[in-house]
Image (cartoon, grey):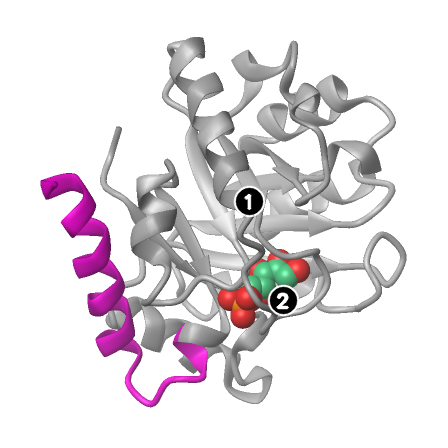
């Protein structure tokens, strides 16, 4: 497995200065830009679509863009995000009529496919599709808003996802999203995550680099233990 990745969620960025904000977190050491797409239907909030993703690419952002689709239906947006410059695209299985087909559409569009599991979404959604997954995103809050508190029961869920990934023998990233902070990232890493989405913890700080460095130190403490 490659190194652990820090993925700031731009949902907590200053939208009036989005290009500069994304450059700033990348300069501060982020690996991936996490892009939360909300449709005010699958989740009770509305965020941004493919035009903003394309604008970031035009602004010169070359880092991977990790698109998290909180939308229903799913398939219509896949091609649009691939054309807009998405690198990874994940969706919620209960929002897709045909999960295998949606995963294949992402792959065919040239992006890395992933599935997202809400805190109460059963793991059986992973059955029969592990061979198609590049990443599994475990939500540690209910989707729709930044700044929520981490739900502790998702640690056990992470451990179970990790077991499934190990049993599959495949190199599937395990991503965690929601309420990730410097003071809980170590136990999250211990439970099996290797890609960490953090919105408010990074963008609400005065010094993005300080938070990202502190997160990396906490994660490194697990690998050295
Ligand atoms: O997908 C979501 C929320 O639906 C997340 O990506 C949040 O944006 C993470 O924000 P913090 O909990 O880190 O503030």
Location of residue 118 with respect to 141 vertically, above or below? above
- How many numbered marks does the figure carry? 2
* Secondary element at image label 1: helix
Q: Is residue 144 left or right of residue 212?
A: right
Query: Who is closer to the viewer here, 36 or 141?
Result: 141
Work out which quarter of the rendered image holds the N terminus and state it: top left
> Quadrant location of the C terminus?
top left
Residue at the disc numbered 1: 154
What is the secondary structure assignment of the residue under circle 2? helix
Considering only vertical position in the picture, is 93 above or below 17? above
Residue at (32% x, 67% y) in the render: 182
Asked whether disc 1 touches disc 2, contact meaning CB atoms under 8 Å apart, the reply is: no
The answer to whether residue 134 is seen in the rendering is no
Question: Where residue 52 is drawn, which disc sits there?
Answer: 2
Based on the picture, tell me whether residue 178 belongs to the magenta stretch: no
Q: Quadrant of ligand 1?
A: bottom right
- Quadrant position of residue 11: bottom right
Foreground pick, 31 / 109: 31
Q: To which quarter of the image does residue 167 belong?
A: top left
- Position of 6 relative to 55 (above/below): above
> Which of the labelled discs sits on residue 142, or is there none?
none
**Ligand 1 neighbours mark 2 (CB distance < 8 Å):** no
Is residue 194 or residue 67 the one in the foreground? 194
Question: Magenta segment, which residues?
Answer: 202-225
**Image coordinates for residue 155, horizontal then vertical, percent:** 48, 43
> Is the stretch drawn in magenta largely helix, strand or loop?
helix
The residue positioned 85% from the left and 52% from the top of the image is: 42
Is residue 141 visible in the rendered image? The answer is yes
């Amino acid at each position: 497995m490659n190194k652990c990745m820090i993925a700031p969620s731009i949902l907590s960025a200053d939208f009036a200065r989005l290009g500069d904000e994304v450059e700033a977190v990348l300069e501060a050491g982020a690996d991936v830009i996490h892009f939360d797409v909300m449709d005010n239907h699958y989740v009770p909030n509305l965020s941004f679509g493919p035009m903003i993703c394309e604008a970031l690419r035009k602004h010169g952002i070359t880092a991977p863009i990790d698109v998290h689709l909180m939308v229903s239906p799913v398939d219509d947006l896949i091609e649009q995000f691939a054309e807009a410059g998405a690198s990874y695209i994940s969706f919620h299985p209960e929002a897709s009529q045909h999960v295998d087909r949606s995963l294949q559409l992402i792959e065919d569009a040239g992006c890395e496919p992933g599935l997202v599991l809400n805190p109460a979404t059963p793991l059986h959604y992973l059955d029969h599709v592990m061979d198609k997954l590049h990443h599994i995103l475990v939500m540690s809050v209910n989707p729709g808003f930044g700044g929520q508190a981490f739900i502790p029961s998702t640690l056990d869920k992470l451990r179970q996802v990790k077991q499934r990934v190990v049993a599959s023998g495949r190199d599937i990233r395990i991503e965690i999203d929601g309420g990730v902070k410097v003071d809980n990232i170590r136990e999250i890493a211990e439970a099996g995550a290797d890609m960490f989405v953090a919105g408010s913890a990074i963008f609400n700080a005065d010094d993005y680099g300080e938070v990202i460095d502190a997160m990396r130190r906490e994660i490194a403490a697990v690998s050295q233990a």
